[in-house]
Image: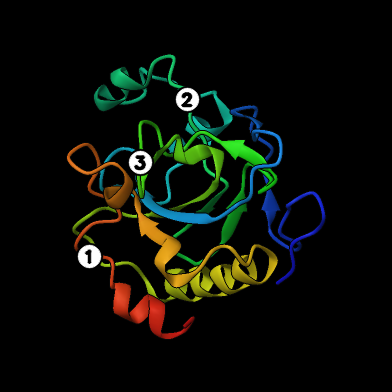
Amino acid sequence: MQIDDEGKVQGVNQRPSTHFDERPLGEEISLLVIHNISLPAGQFATPFVDDLFMGCIDCQAHPSFADLKGLRVSAHCFIKRSGEIVQYVPFSKRAWHAGQSDFLGRSQCNDFSIGIELEGTDTTAYTQNQYNALQSLTKTLIYKYPAITRERVVGHCHIAPGRKTDPGDSFDWNHYFAAIF
């Protein structure tokens, strides 16, 4: 796996989202944030996560989507249950994944982080294919952005405690880290 100079992962499905902007000038990428998402909640292999990140979700397609009206969010990458990686925003750009957040006293985590979404829930075990893809991607990210260290790989729950719980209790941090560090 390789990342080009624009911050795109070579050989993965590229789905350019418009939900991003420029990182602050001179900002170093130094944090990796792991999330989970499924739409509707607990349902996998639907088109709705892609629709959300692409800005074209039909908010009438499911009752739980009413709160998504007008929401502009994205992630750098999404890892499906199969292990397929889809990239929505180049790593050189600021994806809108963290929201109100803080890491070691520094707010606005989107400025200096990469956001990876796993197709899942806080309580459903992730697949081995997802771990394999995430581990491979993480190794590549650490090589390309050496300021991302083990201590700077976190869950959304760590940068937005009380507001976010993902990737949840179902995420096996020890298993994930064992193949990387």
Determine whether, in the image, residue 72 is placed left or right of residue 76. Answer: left
Q: Residue under label 1, please give it.
A: 170
Local crowd at mark 1 within 10 Å, few (<14), some, or many (≥20)? some
SS class of the residue under badge 2? loop
Closer to viewer: mark 1 or mark 2: 1
Q: Nearer the viewer, residue 41 or 35?
A: 35
Residue 47: x, y in percent? 48, 40
Mark 3 or mark 2: name the one nearer the start of the chain. 2
Query: Distance of mark 3 from mark 1, alpha carbons?
Result: 23 Å
| 8 versus 131 height, above or below | above
Determine whether, in the image, residue 20 is placed left or right of residue 58. Answer: right
Q: Examine the image and state in which quarter residue 120 appears.
A: bottom left
Closer to viewer: mark 3 or mark 2: 3
At x 47% / y 25%, what residue is drawn? 57
Query: Distance of mark 1 from mark 2, alpha carbons?
Result: 27 Å
Quarter of the rendering occupied by the N terminus: bottom right
Disc 3 + disc 2, Cβ < 8 Å:
no
Mark 3 or mark 1: name the one nearer the start of the chain. 3
Q: Residue under label 2, please give it.
A: 57
Amino acid carrying mark 1 in the image: Ser
Residue 141: x, y in percent? 62, 65
In the image as oriented, which residue stretches furthest toward the top? 70
Residue 102 is tagged as 3
Residue 62: x, y in percent? 30, 26
Tell me how many marks there are: 3
